Amino acid sequence: MIHAADIDKAVERLANTKFLLVLTGAGISHESGIPTFRGNDGLWQNYRAEELATPWAFERDPVTVWKWYDWRRGIIGKAEPNPGHHAIKELEDIFENFLLITQNVDGLHGRTGVTRMVEIHGNLWRVRCVREGKTSMLMEVPLSSIPPRCECGEMLRPDVVWFGESLPTQALEQAFKALEMCDTLMVVGTSGVVYPVASFPETVKSNGGFVIEINTEATPISNIADVSLYGKSGDILPALVNALGV
Ligand code: BJW
């Protein structure tokens, strides 16, 4: 249940924001039919994301890990950006100083035309040779052979960030700069448990910034958010853009 006073508070802040930083997680793509990680529908053959999204799982059993990605690529390949994704593109058009940091690897934000974006956990349509480190796009769905291989004969892996791996340096640098510069952070559809991204709201708060959270349920971020708007991002984000009325 969203209180009108909370919406008003968020809109008033946005109207006075100089630099808007938006951080998204799997929840924003849920209304496009893509399972989240920690919801019940995120389970795949009884595996949890934490058991598959690791370099050790890939080393031990690349076929199982690739089958999980092939399953997800099949779902994502049929999905379309939803009103939440489109509203974020509208926010990019409204704010001169803007950055979107997404933890999502599904590429749906990019399909709205948003350009000031950092895909901080990578992109599951991009693959990387495990020997040469060379990246390329691989759009085939379903994959004709698992695991897919590079021209050099070595395995390809999804160009995403697994647990225990460092986030891409350039993406992190862009994120840290924006965390310093922004006065408002809008956090959408993330459970706020995966680091280092989970610490971003705290960083903004300690820099004196304002945090707006949008989620269907309370998360650890709710404890520090200035406003939490509980509901679907596909309903709340368009309502906020509409209320901004620019
Ligand atoms: C809706 C909705 C609707 C639903 N509308 N809302 C410090 C402390 C503790 C641990 C660590 C630490 N630093 C590093 C770690 C270790 C680890 C970590 O964080 N572990 C925790 C689990 C404890 N982090 C790492 O290893 C990271 N690397 C790193 O830090 O490198 C340096 C280092 C290495 C080693 C040691 C120390 C330092 C890498 C993390 C990589 C995460 N990778 C994944 C997979 C990406 C590829 C892929 O997709 O396959 O990223 S895991 C998965 O979780 C994915 C997501 O991006 C990420 C976050 O999930 P997200 O988006 O929040 O999804 P959910 O499902 O959790 O939540 C969805 C939310 O939406 C829910 O709240 C719903 O309510 C909501 N929702 N419908 C609005 N319609």
Image (tube, rainbow, N blue to C red):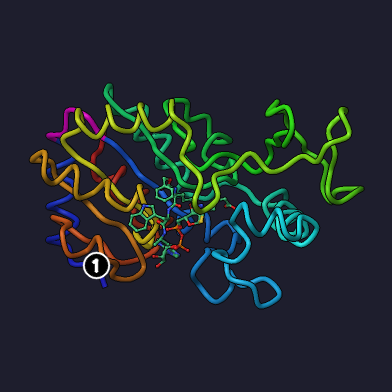
7 relative to 238 in the view: left or right: left
The residue lying at 22 percent from left, 51 percent from top is 212
- Residue 169 placed where, x, y %? 44, 29
Q: Which image quarter: residue 193?
A: bottom left
Judge left or right: residue 102 versus residue 30.
left
Left or right relative to 219: residue 206: left
Relative vertical location of residue 123 with respect to residue 84 in this rendering, above or below: above
Quarter placement of the C terminus: top left
Quadrant of res 190 = bottom left
Q: Residue beneath label 1, please?
A: 2
Front-most of 146 and 245? 146
Give the quarter of the figure containing the N terminus.
bottom left
The number of callouts visible is 1
Work out whether residue 18 or residue 177 is closer to the camera in this orientation and state it. Answer: 177
Quadrant of the picture in which ligand 1 is shown: bottom left
Q: Amino acid at mark 1?
A: Ile
Q: Residue 56 lies in what quarter of the image? A: bottom right
Q: Residue at x 26, y 56 (%)?
A: 213
Residue that appears at 13% across and 41% down = 209
Q: Residues within 10 Å of mark 1 (few under 14, many from 20)?
A: few
Q: Is residue 95 magenta?
A: no
Q: Which residues are magenta?
A: 16-20
